[in-house]
Image: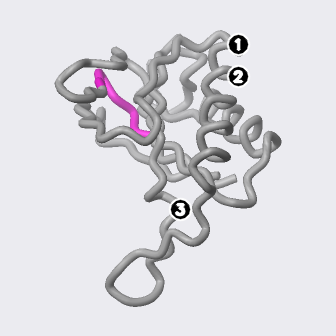
Amino acid sequence: MQGLIQRVSFAKVEVAGTIVGEIKTGLVLLLGVEKEDTQAHVAKLLHKVSNYRIFTDNDGKMNLSLKDIAGELLVVSQFTLAADTQKGMRPSFSSAAVPERANALYELFVEQAKESGLEVATGQFAADMQVTLCNDGPVTFNLKV
Protein backbone atom coordinates (compact mmCIF):
# COMPACT_ATOMS: atom_id res chain seq x y z
CA MET A 1 0.00 0.00 0.00
CA GLN A 2 1.34 3.37 -0.96
CA GLY A 3 0.33 6.84 0.01
CA LEU A 4 1.63 9.99 -1.58
CA ILE A 5 0.93 12.80 0.88
CA GLN A 6 1.04 16.49 0.12
CA ARG A 7 0.81 19.20 2.75
CA VAL A 8 -1.81 21.65 1.50
CA SER A 9 -3.44 24.93 2.42
CA PHE A 10 -6.55 23.82 0.50
CA ALA A 11 -7.62 21.09 -1.92
CA LYS A 12 -10.69 19.86 -3.75
CA VAL A 13 -11.73 17.02 -6.03
CA GLU A 14 -14.26 17.41 -8.80
CA VAL A 15 -16.09 14.77 -10.83
CA ALA A 16 -17.96 15.96 -13.94
CA GLY A 17 -17.74 19.58 -12.75
CA THR A 18 -19.14 18.86 -9.27
CA ILE A 19 -17.03 19.16 -6.11
CA VAL A 20 -17.18 15.78 -4.35
CA GLY A 21 -14.54 16.47 -1.68
CA GLU A 22 -12.88 19.58 -0.29
CA ILE A 23 -10.55 20.46 2.59
CA LYS A 24 -8.72 23.42 4.06
CA THR A 25 -5.34 23.05 5.81
CA GLY A 26 -4.18 19.45 5.96
CA LEU A 27 -3.08 16.61 3.72
CA VAL A 28 -4.04 15.23 0.35
CA LEU A 29 -3.45 11.49 0.31
CA LEU A 30 -3.21 9.77 -3.07
CA LEU A 31 -3.81 6.15 -2.06
CA GLY A 32 -2.52 3.23 -4.13
CA VAL A 33 -3.60 -0.31 -3.26
CA GLU A 34 -1.53 -3.31 -4.34
CA LYS A 35 -2.43 -7.00 -4.66
CA GLU A 36 -0.74 -8.07 -1.44
CA ASP A 37 -2.27 -5.34 0.73
CA THR A 38 -4.34 -6.27 3.79
CA GLN A 39 -6.27 -4.63 6.60
CA ALA A 40 -2.99 -4.50 8.53
CA HIS A 41 -1.51 -2.32 5.78
CA VAL A 42 -4.50 0.01 6.07
CA ALA A 43 -3.96 0.43 9.82
CA LYS A 44 -0.23 0.96 9.43
CA LEU A 45 -0.60 3.57 6.68
CA LEU A 46 -3.35 5.40 8.56
CA HIS A 47 -1.14 5.59 11.64
CA LYS A 48 1.72 6.96 9.55
CA VAL A 49 -0.43 9.51 7.69
CA SER A 50 -2.06 10.73 10.91
CA ASN A 51 1.15 11.04 12.87
CA TYR A 52 3.81 11.93 10.27
CA ARG A 53 5.38 15.16 11.49
CA ILE A 54 5.44 17.45 8.45
CA PHE A 55 3.71 20.59 9.74
CA THR A 56 5.81 23.38 11.19
CA ASP A 57 5.93 24.25 14.85
CA ASN A 58 6.55 27.71 16.34
CA ASP A 59 10.27 27.35 15.60
CA GLY A 60 9.67 26.61 11.91
CA LYS A 61 10.63 22.94 12.30
CA MET A 62 8.60 20.04 10.88
CA ASN A 63 7.51 18.70 14.26
CA LEU A 64 3.71 18.57 14.09
CA SER A 65 1.40 15.94 12.65
CA LEU A 66 -2.01 16.15 11.02
CA LYS A 67 -3.55 15.21 14.36
CA ASP A 68 -1.48 17.82 16.20
CA ILE A 69 -2.81 20.65 14.04
CA ALA A 70 -6.36 19.24 13.78
CA GLY A 71 -5.91 19.30 10.00
CA GLU A 72 -8.18 17.79 7.40
CA LEU A 73 -7.50 14.81 5.12
CA LEU A 74 -8.55 14.42 1.49
CA VAL A 75 -8.23 10.80 0.36
CA VAL A 76 -8.09 10.15 -3.39
CA SER A 77 -7.77 6.67 -4.89
CA GLN A 78 -4.76 6.50 -7.21
CA PHE A 79 -4.11 3.11 -8.78
CA THR A 80 -1.22 4.50 -10.85
CA LEU A 81 0.90 4.57 -7.67
CA ALA A 82 1.10 0.78 -8.00
CA ALA A 83 2.73 1.09 -11.43
CA ASP A 84 6.02 -0.63 -12.19
CA THR A 85 8.09 1.87 -14.17
CA GLN A 86 11.39 -0.01 -14.12
CA LYS A 87 11.27 -1.31 -17.69
CA GLY A 88 10.26 0.13 -21.02
CA MET A 89 8.29 3.24 -21.82
CA ARG A 90 4.87 2.13 -20.62
CA PRO A 91 3.92 1.48 -16.98
CA SER A 92 2.82 -1.97 -15.89
CA PHE A 93 -0.02 -2.24 -13.41
CA SER A 94 0.43 -5.94 -12.66
CA SER A 95 0.99 -5.25 -8.96
CA ALA A 96 -2.19 -3.18 -8.56
CA ALA A 97 -5.09 -4.75 -6.69
CA VAL A 98 -8.19 -5.63 -8.70
CA PRO A 99 -10.78 -2.83 -8.48
CA GLU A 100 -13.12 -4.66 -6.05
CA ARG A 101 -10.30 -5.38 -3.59
CA ALA A 102 -8.78 -1.91 -4.01
CA ASN A 103 -12.13 -0.23 -3.38
CA ALA A 104 -12.76 -2.33 -0.27
CA LEU A 105 -9.40 -1.34 1.24
CA TYR A 106 -9.84 2.30 0.16
CA GLU A 107 -13.26 2.42 1.86
CA LEU A 108 -11.81 0.73 4.96
CA PHE A 109 -9.05 3.34 5.10
CA VAL A 110 -11.59 6.18 4.89
CA GLU A 111 -13.85 4.58 7.52
CA GLN A 112 -10.97 4.03 9.95
CA ALA A 113 -9.64 7.56 9.36
CA LYS A 114 -13.05 8.99 10.29
CA GLU A 115 -13.30 6.70 13.33
CA SER A 116 -9.89 7.95 14.49
CA GLY A 117 -11.31 11.46 14.73
CA LEU A 118 -9.90 12.94 11.53
CA GLU A 119 -11.99 15.27 9.38
CA VAL A 120 -12.02 13.34 6.09
CA ALA A 121 -13.16 14.17 2.57
CA THR A 122 -12.79 11.86 -0.43
CA GLY A 123 -12.69 11.65 -4.15
CA GLN A 124 -14.79 9.08 -5.99
CA PHE A 125 -13.27 5.65 -6.53
CA ALA A 126 -12.52 4.82 -10.20
CA ALA A 127 -13.91 8.14 -11.45
CA ASP A 128 -12.24 10.62 -13.76
CA MET A 129 -11.31 13.19 -11.11
CA GLN A 130 -9.82 16.65 -11.30
CA VAL A 131 -7.78 17.46 -8.20
CA THR A 132 -6.97 21.07 -7.38
CA LEU A 133 -4.63 21.86 -4.52
CA CYS A 134 -2.18 24.35 -3.13
CA ASN A 135 0.86 22.33 -2.02
CA ASP A 136 2.20 24.17 1.02
CA GLY A 137 5.99 24.25 0.86
CA PRO A 138 5.89 22.31 -1.42
CA VAL A 139 5.97 19.33 0.92
CA THR A 140 5.37 15.88 -0.57
CA PHE A 141 6.27 12.40 0.74
CA ASN A 142 5.74 8.90 -0.61
CA LEU A 143 4.81 6.53 2.22
CA LYS A 144 4.96 2.80 1.55
CA VAL A 145 3.90 0.20 4.08
Circles 1 and 2: CB distance less than 8 Å? yes
130 left or right of 113 in image: left
The numbered disc on residue 31 is none
Q: Which residue is mark 1?
A: 115
The numbered disc on residue 82 is 3
Identify the magenta region.
5-12
Which residue ends up furthest to the right in the rendered image?
40
Q: Is residue 93 above or below residue 100?
A: below
Q: Is residue 127 above or below residue 23?
A: below
- What color scheme is it? one colour
Callout 3 amino acid: Ala
Q: Which residue is mark 2?
A: 112
Q: CA distance from mark 1 to mark 2?
A: 5 Å
SS for tag 1? helix
Q: Position of residue 60 (x, y in %)?
A: 41, 29
Which residue is found at the position 60% from the left and 51% from the top?
A: 33
Which residue ends up furthest to the bottom in the rendered image?
88
